[in-house]
Image (cartoon, helix red, strand yellow):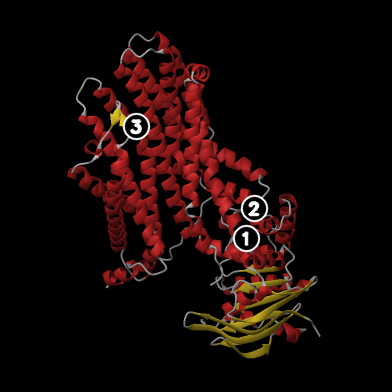
């Protein structure tokens, strides 16, 4: 049985009169790919933000277990949360949200430079990740010179290059056509669970969610169902 | 129907309050500074004696020098106003509005914001009149009567500012065609040809030559004309060479950047060296003028025994005028930088938020944008001062020996000006903090 890398219990969060999370309990196993599904406003992105230490819940706790021990994310200061996100987590957003002035490899290397790695080594690592994601030869292109799918692969490389044990992805294929979406999803899975890492993904696209090992469905700030995904069935 | 929807989209939402207020503030600052400058210059026209013409000529030169930073501030205000509308105008296009309707809405909105800002600027000008009246020229304070503008100017300036906003909106719409999807594709980083440098060097050499032959010039009029030519040529060349030098330095900085902030800053400048130059180019003119004229006045003070009180006061007043022009120029650049940076933060809010989610400290983002402004500013201010020193080499050399304090004062004012721009930049830090706040 796999150990848990993230354990959340009793998470509640309101934005003004709107209740985004209403007592959510969720455990994420090491090396699994977990899809959080739900309609708009169901609370899935808020849940992802709470799990990743981006948003502080009004109530409840989030624990993160790594090779060096266990920390309660909800008890960390803003600065400590930033550091945890920088060093232990990776993020992929819907629009990629890469820095347009930088080249592909600089975007990836920046994540390592923020952790203090010298630029030369950081770019070397970045080139390796870009090559692994099928972007060899495009390292020095600016983001505007890449297609949507290529840019999203750069975002995946940026999320992975620090050796993040958990990658959080918020609608990572939301802005892509179905073919590119499928390719990007495969790249995301290969580079996370394929390497023994954990993927937590928010999506409203059932075809994306079914490729994960586990799917939880959300409605009105609560988890209302849990299913096994295609990855688990295949395993 | 489109008009109705247009009104709905044009209304400032609660989240867009800052974006609406900023252009108003920018236009207000521009109007206040413009009225202050005209008010100060106006007082020179109340004199009718022989030497008044000299003062009036010098006032015109100062006004010309302040046109560039003022235009830069006006442009920044207009661009900020235009950026605010892009997304909503694209939505209107999607709803089926004709390009003419979209253009009309854009112009109307710009004019309304500019007029509001201009009216606030008039009020701010009245607040500035008392300190402005205390500035001494010809041995006594200018006085409230001297610097207080009449109704024609108080009406003409706000109308002019509103017209500028309308023209900027029209030009902006023609330059950036807003597609229904609001997509703006990024081009490659622009390349600037090295021929700019060659032309620049040739012009500076010519200007040095002109100054060198001044001693054999036959008349004072010819000397003034040749000095004017050298001054004008050197200023023109700055616009040609400035962006090229900024790009060259930024390229070197990209290669040697070792920290995220340095890399981001250098890449930001390299993205558009012309924009980086435009933001600070007003400082180039004033720095150049401060050294150019400051050296001349210092040498005259050191060697020339002023024949009478009037001449001595004139030299003192030229020095005062130089300092006021430099300070005014830096104030305008500081405002322009503040407005541009506020617009840039609003434009890139999503990116800043995502970087904060990745764990990038706000201090790193702030350091990057601070460097992206301060580095071109330092290059511009000191580069222009150096160019002036080279063009006026015999004179600056003499000044350094006989009146080093004058050059030290000029250097101190330039350093102070850079500090003021830094403050303008720092004023937008809270906006960045809000943009990078991930806790929803």
Q: Specify which label sits upstream in the sequence, 3 or 2.
A: 3
Distance between mark 2 and mark 1 Cα atoms: 10 Å
Q: Is residue A88 left or right of residue B408?
A: right
Above or below, A146 relative to A90: above
Q: Nearer the viewer, mark 3 or mark 2?
A: 3
Q: Which of the pair B170/A41 is nearer the observer? A: A41
Q: How many marks?
A: 3
* Mark 2: few/some/many CA within 10 Å (<14, 14-19, 20+): many
Question: Residue drawn at (70%, 60%), measured in percent from left and top?
Answer: A130
Please tell me how crowded label 3 is: few (under 14), some (14-19), or many (20+) other residues with Cα within 10 Å.
Answer: many
Q: Residue at x 39, y 40 (%)?
A: B69
Give the residue number, with chain letter if any, for mark 1.
B360
| For residue B337, side relative to residue A73 (left or right) | left
- Mark 2 and mark 1, same subunit? yes
Q: Position of residue A215 (x, y in %)?
A: 66, 85
The kind of secondary structure element at disc 3 is helix
Q: Is residue B196 visible?
A: no
User: Element under label 2?
Assistant: helix
Dot 2 or dot 1, earlier in sequence: 2
Q: Is residue A161 above or below residue B194?
A: below
Can you identify the residue that label 2 sits on?
A: B260
Whether tag 2 and tag 1 are in contact, CB under 8 A, the answer is yes
Looking at the picture, do discs 3 and 2 lie on one chain? yes
Tell me the quarter of the image containing the N terminus of chain B: bottom left
Work out how far the residue at label 3 is from the one at label 2, CA to CA, in angstroms.
41 Å
Residue B349 vertical placement versus B370 (above, below): below
Report the residue marked by disc 3. Answer: B62
Image coordinates of residue B221 in percent, x first then y, are: 31, 15
């Amino acid at each position: 049985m796999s150990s848990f890398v993230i354990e959340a219990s009793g998470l509640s969060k309101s934005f003004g009169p709107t209740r985004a999370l209403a007592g959510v309990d969720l455990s994420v196993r090491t090396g699994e790919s977990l899809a959080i599904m739900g309609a708009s406003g169901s609370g899935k992105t808020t849940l992802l933000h709470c799990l990743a230490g981006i948003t502080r819940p009004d109530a409840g706790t989030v624990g993160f277990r790594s090779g060096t021990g266990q920390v309660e994310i909800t008890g960390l200061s803003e600065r400590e949360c930033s550091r945890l996100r920088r060093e232990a987590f990776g993020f992929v957003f819907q629009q990629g949200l890469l820095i347009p002035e930088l080249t592909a490899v600089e975007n990836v290397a920046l994540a390592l430079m923020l952790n203090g790695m010298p630029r030369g080594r950081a770019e070397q690592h970045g080139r390796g990740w870009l090559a692994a994601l099928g972007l060899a030869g495009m390292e020095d292109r600016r983001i505007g010179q890449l297609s949507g799918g290529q840019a999203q692969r750069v975002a995946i490389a940026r999320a992975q290059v620090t050796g993040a044990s958990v990658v959080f992805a918020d609608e990572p294929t939301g802005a892509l056509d179905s073919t590119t979406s499928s390719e990007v999803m495969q790249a995301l899975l290969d580079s996370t669970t394929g390497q023994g890492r954990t993927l937590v993904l928010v999506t409203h696209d059932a075809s994306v969610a079914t490729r994960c090992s586990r799917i939880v469905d959300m409605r009105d700030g609560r988890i209302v169902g849990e299913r096994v995904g295609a990855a688990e069935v295949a395993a | 129907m489109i008009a109705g929807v247009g009104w709905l989209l044009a209304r400032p939402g609660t989240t867009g309050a800052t974006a609406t207020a900023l252009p108003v503030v920018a236009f207000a600052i521009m109007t206040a500074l413009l009225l202050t400058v005209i008010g100060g210059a106006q007082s020179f026209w109340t004199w009718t004696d022989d030497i008044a013409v000299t003062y009036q000529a010098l006032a015109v030169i100062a006004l010309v020098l302040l046109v560039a930073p003022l235009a830069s501030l006006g442009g920044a205000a207009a661009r900020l106003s235009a950026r605010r509308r892009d997304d909503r105008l694209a939505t209107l296009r999607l709803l089926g509005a004709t390009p003419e309707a979209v253009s009309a809405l854009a112009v109307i909105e710009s004019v309304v914001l500019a007029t509001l800002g201009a009216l606030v600027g008039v009020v701010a000008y009245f607040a500035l009149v008392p300190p402005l009246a205390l500035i001494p020229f010809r041995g006594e304070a200018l006085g409230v009567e001297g610097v207080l503008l009449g109704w024609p100017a108080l009406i003409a300036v706000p109308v002019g500012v509103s017209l500028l906003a309308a023209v900027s909106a029209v030009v902006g719409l023609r330059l950036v065609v807003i597609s229904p999807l609001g997509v703006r594709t990024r081009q490659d980083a622009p390349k600037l040809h090295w021929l700019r440098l060659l032309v620049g060097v040739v012009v500076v050499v010519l200007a040095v030559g002109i100054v060198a032959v001044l001693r054999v010039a036959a008349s004072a009029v010819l000397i003034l004309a040749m000095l004017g030519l050298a001054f004008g040529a050197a200023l023109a060349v700055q616009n040609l060479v400035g962006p090229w030098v900024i790009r060259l330095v930024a390229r070197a900085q990209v290669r040697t950047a070792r920290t995220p902030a340095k890399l981001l800053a250098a890449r930001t400048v390299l993205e558009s060296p012309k924009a980086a130059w435009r933001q600070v180019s007003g400082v180039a003119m004033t720095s150049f003028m401060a050294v150019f004229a400051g050296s001349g006045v210092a040498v005259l003070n050191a060697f020339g025994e002023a024949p009478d009180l009037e001449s001595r006061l004139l030299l003192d007043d030229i020095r005062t005028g130089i300092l006021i022009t430099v300070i005014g120029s830096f104030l305008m650049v500081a405002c322009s930088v503040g407005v541009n940076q506020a617009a840039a933060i609003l434009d890139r809010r999503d990116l800043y938020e995502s970087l904060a989610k990745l764990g990038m400290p706000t201090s790193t983002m702030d350091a990057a944008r601070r460097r992206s402004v301060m580095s071109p500013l330092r290059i511009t201010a000191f580069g222009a001062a150096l160019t002036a020193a080279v063009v006026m080499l015999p004179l600056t050399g003499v000044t350094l020996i006989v009146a080093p304090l004058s050059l030290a004062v000029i250097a101190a004012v330039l350093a102070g000006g850079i500090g003021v721009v830094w403050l303008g930049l720092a004023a937008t830090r809270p906006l960045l903090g809000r943009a990078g706040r991930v806790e929803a």
